[in-house]
Image (spheres, coloured by chain):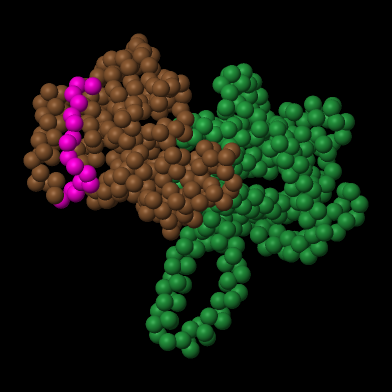
Amino acid sequence: MKKILQIENVGMAFSTKQGSYTALRKINLTIREGEFVTLIGHSGCGKSTLLNLVAGLTLPTEGILLCDGREIGGPGPERAVVFQNHSLLPWLSCFENVYLGVERVFGRLEGAPKLKKRTEAALTLVGLGDVQAKFPNEISGGMKQRVGIARALAMQPKILLMDEPFGALDALTRANLQEELMRIVADTGATTVMVTHDVDEAVLLSDRVMMLTNGPAATIGEILEVNLPRPRQRLALAHDPVYAECRAAILEFLYHKQLKRAA
Amino acid sequence: MHAASLNGVVIDAPPKRKVSTVESTHATSIAKPDVPLAVAVEPPALQSNRNNIWRNLLKVLAPPLFGLLLLIALWALVSVKGGSIPGPMKTWLAAVKLFADPFYNNGPNDQGIGWNVLASLQRVGIGFGFAALVGIPLGFMIGRFDFLNRMVGPIISLLRPVSPLAWLPIGLLVFKRADPAATWTIFICSIWPMILNTAQGVQRVPQDYMNVARVLKLSEWKIFTKILFPAVLPYMLTGIRLSIGTAWLVIVAAEMLTGGVGIGFWVWDEWNNLKVEHIIIAIFVIGIVGLILEQTLILVARRFTHDSN
């Protein structure tokens, strides 16, 4: 499989009032096309920082990131981000929110009817074909996050980046959206990097789980391959020994090897 | 002045709305006698519903109505003891006479109160309009470019506390006429809240939205029309509301100094004529017009404020 993302010896230091703060060091990671990778770790370990580096929202102080063989020098629609707090523009309808990205990516090549069709297709993909005209404050939190996913997917990114996309949702809505996400990823074959702090979410969704050590100067401590066949069924997995093993491995890492002193 | 009006707007908004409903009760109180007749015909369920509505209405209206009555009573007391201040009744009769023909015109120095109010509103409108034309784009630039912010910041801090009336002689010197000089003071007093609030709005555009813009790689024009402008609009409208409030305060004083047609000059004129009841009427008129301006802008602002969640 093609390498879509290469992270080589990346380090990130922020300058603060107390001096330089090293958030990440020596991150090495290669992600293949179509892979689903999650980043997991205790809060404050730098998962989101790493995702922002891939997004290009911040630039690394050391090392290099390559997307499809080209250096990442800034943000761009080929690395679409689903933000934790959905970040929909409240003055635009759901349709317009998605259309904004579609227009930017395909506007030069395609006419308005085709752009409209793309937008509608993306909203239908996330199961929101019928609420296009509504504004973000008129729909539920789960629906907003779906619109966020639709906005990202509609741009046909090379990589889909998700920063704890379901963190602010209740457990049932979250489970529902996880299933949806698995279906969408299976349908589109999107390469996905997702930040999470939910162990079950990581095992259920991922091909590989990257476990980050505690900050400061966090790095990838362990990589877990999740060898579970797809499509995966949440209920069936509950009694699957491989699932339990993966889950135990992550818990072991988080709560034994990287136990954080009471935060 | 700015801080006071800012606080006043935020905290006093609900009671003020009640005051405006008091005005509408003058109309409903006339309709009141009809209601019992209508109720008598209706089935009991509807009747009790009606009763509830009246009870709630009474609950909402009683305190402001009581306040207003207290004010009038105090005023009556003062007028009886004070001697030279006309009482509520005398003022009311004068007002009835005055508002019977608000738009007469007997030359530049003797016009109806309606013309005077309109003349003041026109000055406020023009001065305010120019202030918006200059202040809002300037606010956007100051908010967007830190260099500009730090360049202009001290100048604004220096000039903002100066009473706009201090600028009146400069206006007279430059424009050679009283009327544009009054408009000039309005311009000066309106521009600060507009610059500062717009700039603050730009600086407070949520970083999330700007990140969206960066990930989508939107053009500067798209960033402005789809993100910056809608996000700043509520702040801008706050600036506009504060400006209008200040402008309406200042115009009365400015017109007292410049003369001509206008509610401020009218107050001064009536003082020279020793028609104190007219001055009291003017105080009410100025208050009501100011209230209407502010409430209108609050309504507009509500229309353009978006919940981010």
Range shown magenta: A220-235
The reply, left or right, for residue A124 in relation to residue A183 is: right
Q: Residue at x 43, y 48 (%)?
A: A122
Who is closer to the viewer here, B179 or A61?
A61
> Which image quarter is the N terminus of chain B in?
top right
Residue A160: x, y in percent? 37, 36
Is residue A224 part of the magenta span, yes or no? yes
The vertical placement of B41 against B283, above or below, is: below
Residue B256: x, y in percent? 77, 40
Q: Residue at x 36, y 13 (%)?
A: A62
Is residue A231 part of the magenta span, yes or no? yes
The vertical placement of B102 against A79, above or below, is: below
The reply, left or right, for residue B256 in relation to residue A173 is: right
Chain A drawn colour: brown
> Looking at the image, which residue sits at the far right?
B107
Location of residue B177 by image quarter: top right
Which lettered chain is shown in green? B
Q: Residue at x 60, y 26 (%)?
A: B142
Who is closer to the viewer here, B29 or A162?
A162
Q: Residue at x 68, y 30 (%)?
A: B163
* Label tally: 0
The reply, left or right, for residue B165 in relation to residue A219 is: right
Who is closer to the viewer here, A263 or B248?
A263
Residue B255: x, y in percent? 78, 40
Residue B100: x, y in percent? 78, 65
